[in-house]
């Protein structure tokens, strides 16, 4: 594996979500054509080695993820490490009842859910907004990325059981994230353009007075 292949693989691994060919190319300082070829080669290599990971083409780009048969294993690791079972159960209630207010979560999960939601908020899976005398509990971008499923078949089987409000929120979150990234890139490009203009003007001034 050459250095460019290692770069592309590292980007796919580090991002952990869908990423466009254009974005990978930009991060790795490669052309679109080079990037497409490298990703295809990596994809074939992963398949040929019967790897536990695979590279899949998604609607908005590429993603390095686990194969379907390892999802239960990964889920059990997640539930036993970063999220203990009580937290996972409270998060499940929030997801299935979403949108939901904190007082309703407490009714369903007992007063212990106060501590659960505090921990979930600290870990970035939920956010709370004041709503009257209670709080509106919202699922965050991290929630939707963290519990993403690897294949289209698995994803659709899961999504068929998810309330439309949750799906709508996920779509809005993705749009917002994409817009923020686009604006950041525009600002960066604008800043670079201004620097180039200033440099060019400085050189012109030096030549004029030289």
Image (cartoon, rainbow, N blue to C red):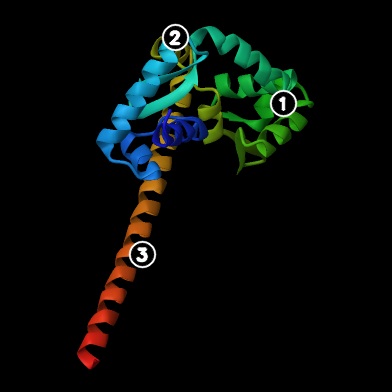
Q: Is there any visible trace of residue 99 in the rendered image?
A: no
- Neighbor class of circle 2 (other Cα within 10 Å; few <14, some 14-19, many 20+) is few
Q: Position of residue 22 (x, y in %)?
A: 31, 39
Observer-nearest of 121 and 41: 41
Q: Which mark is residue 202?
A: none
Q: Position of residue 157 (x, y in %)?
A: 44, 9
- Secondary structure of the residue carrying tag 2 is helix
The answer to which quarter of the image holds residue 81 is top right
Q: Residue at the spot x=68%, y=32% of the render?
A: 120
Q: Is residue 176 above or below residue 100?
A: below
- Neighbor class of circle 1 (other Cα within 10 Å; few <14, some 14-19, many 20+) is some
Q: Distance between the Cα atoms at labels 3 and 2?
A: 45 Å
Residue occupied by mark 2:
157
Q: Distance between the Cα atoms at labels 1 and 3?
A: 49 Å
Whether the residues at callouts 1 and 2 have beta carbons within 8 Å, the answer is no
Observer-nearest of 109 and 171: 171
Q: Is residue 108 above or below residue 145?
A: above
Q: Position of residue 19 (x, y in %)?
A: 39, 33
- Pair 1/2: label in front: 2
Q: Residue furthest front?
A: 2
Residue occupied by mark 3:
191
Q: Is there any visible trace of residue 32 in the rendered image?
A: yes
Residue occupied by mark 1:
106
Q: Residue furthest left?
A: 208
Q: Earlier in the sequence, mark 1 or mark 3?
A: 1
């Amino acid at each position: 594996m050459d250095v460019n292949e290692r770069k592309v693989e590292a980007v796919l691994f580090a991002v952990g979500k869908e990423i466009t060919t254009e974005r990978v190319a930009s991060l790795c300082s490669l052309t679109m054509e080079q990037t497409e070829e490298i990703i295809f080669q990596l994809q074939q290599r992963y398949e040929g080695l019967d790897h536990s990971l695979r590279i899949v083409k998604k609607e908005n780009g590429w993603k390095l993820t686990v194969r379907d048969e390892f999802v239960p294993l990964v889920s059990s690791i997640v539930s036993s490490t970063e999220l203990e079972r009580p937290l996972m159960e409270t998060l499940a209630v929030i997801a299935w009842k979403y949108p939901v207010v904190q007082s309703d979560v407490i009714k369903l999960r007992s007063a212990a859910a106060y501590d659960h939601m505090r921990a979930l908020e600290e870990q970035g899976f939920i956010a709370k907004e004041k709503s009257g005398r209670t709080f509106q509990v919202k699922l965050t971008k991290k929630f939707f990325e963290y519990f993403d499923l690897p294949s289209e078949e698995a994803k659709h089987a899961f999504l068929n059981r998810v309330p439309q409000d949750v799906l709508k929120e996920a779509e809005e979150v993705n749009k917002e994230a994409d817009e923020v990234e686009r604006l950041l890139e525009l600002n960066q490009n604008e800043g670079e353009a201004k620097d180039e203009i200033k440099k060019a003007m400085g050189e012109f001034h030096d030549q004029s007075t030289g």
